[in-house]
Amino acid sequence: MLTVIGEGLVDVVQRASGTEVHVGGSPLNVAVGLARLDHPVQFIGRYGKDAYGESVAAHLRASSVMLPQAPDELPTSVATAVIDDDGAATYTFDLAWELPGLADRLAFMLQGTTLLHTGSIATMLAPGAADVLAAVEHAHPSATISFDPNCRPSIITDVDFAREQTEKFVALADVVKASDEDLQWLYPGQDVLESARKWLALGGSNGGSEGPALVVVTRGAAGPWGVNAAGEAEFPAPKVDIADTVGAGDSFMAALVSGVVDRGLAGAQNRDALRALPAEGLAELLAEAARAAAITVSRSGANPPSRAELDAAPRS
């Protein structure tokens, strides 16, 4: 069982041709992406009893994502994305993030989880962020942890706080993905790849963690780059006609995690094997994830590929 914990919301996408409504939220998109890649996955997040909440639940169930959390009385969160002429998205948010009762059910809900993924708003915004950190700390002794900060400066404006919070999760994570924009915001004036290299050694202060086994940086059209103990690797971004970039990083993250699971490297018992992944193996993970992201940007909204679509995608 894979578990994703984080925010689910509705993306209201505004473009010159009109307005569309899609279910989204970075962790939710990763959960859907994993399910479409044929992994059993549960999503722990909140959504309301309103029409948007019904859309969230229906969207997850349509991709066979399990929902252990019932809807609550708060409104479902909304992200408004304005798409420019190049397909890039700018976001504003109206959201609530809390997980009432999670602490009492955490051990039961995470039983059997071999990999837990989280990131984005869920790891930054109180009061829910504390529950997410507790979930990661609980899962770490038995499960692989993956993390994507997916920074939202329009929500978390204090970069010092965001950096501190991000580093708590990086230190506990095995697989970390960040965009070059994330790293530029978190560490202004520093080379983004050097910042990623430093994350490899960011363990030791949280729960005895050794820090991540691999760190990946997405760089838009320049393609992804990654670093692990064996070295560094990169892969050129596939050339596609871009509809928009909504959900591209989440599809990349889902395929990256999927690659780890497919190679039998999920679960804390496989932590040493994951750390021993050769640079060639890292390059293969980057290539698979880049192909997944390319499929997503070729169509509107956060619409990650199925296993069949990813397998059929061009290899270069």
Image: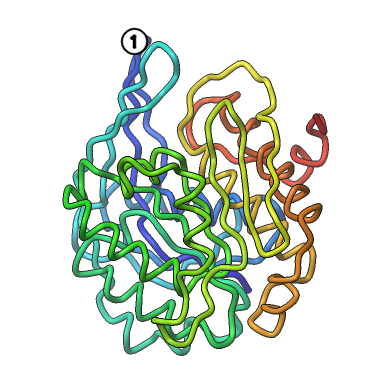
Say which amino acid is labelled 1. Answer: Ala
Q: Image quadrant of residue 125? A: bottom left
Question: Up-down: is 297 above or below 23?
Answer: above
* Image location of residue 15, percent across then percent down: 35, 16
Residue at 19% from the left image edge and 60% from the top image edge: 74
In the rendered image, the quadrant that contains the N terminus is: bottom right
Helix, strand or loop status at disc 1: loop
Question: Up-down: is 113 above or below 244?
Answer: below
The 10 Å Cα crowd at callout 1, few under 14, some 14 to 19, many 20 or more, is few
Q: Is 66 on the left or on the right of 190, as rendered? A: right
Residue 44 in view here: yes
In the rendered image, the quadrant that contains the C terminus is: top right
* Image location of residue 63, percent across then percent down: 59, 52
Q: Is 16 on the left or on the right of 157, as rendered? A: right
Residue at 48% from the left image edge and 29% from the top image edge: 245
The residue that disc 1 covers is: 16
Residue at 39% from the left image edge and 81% from the top image edge: 205
Q: How is the image coloured?
A: rainbow
Residue 52 in view here: no
* Image location of residue 61, percent across then percent down: 53, 56
Q: How many marks?
A: 1
* Image location of residue 146, percent across then percent down: 53, 65
Toward the viewer: 221 or 95? 221
Residue at 73% from the left image edge and 41% from the top image edge: 287
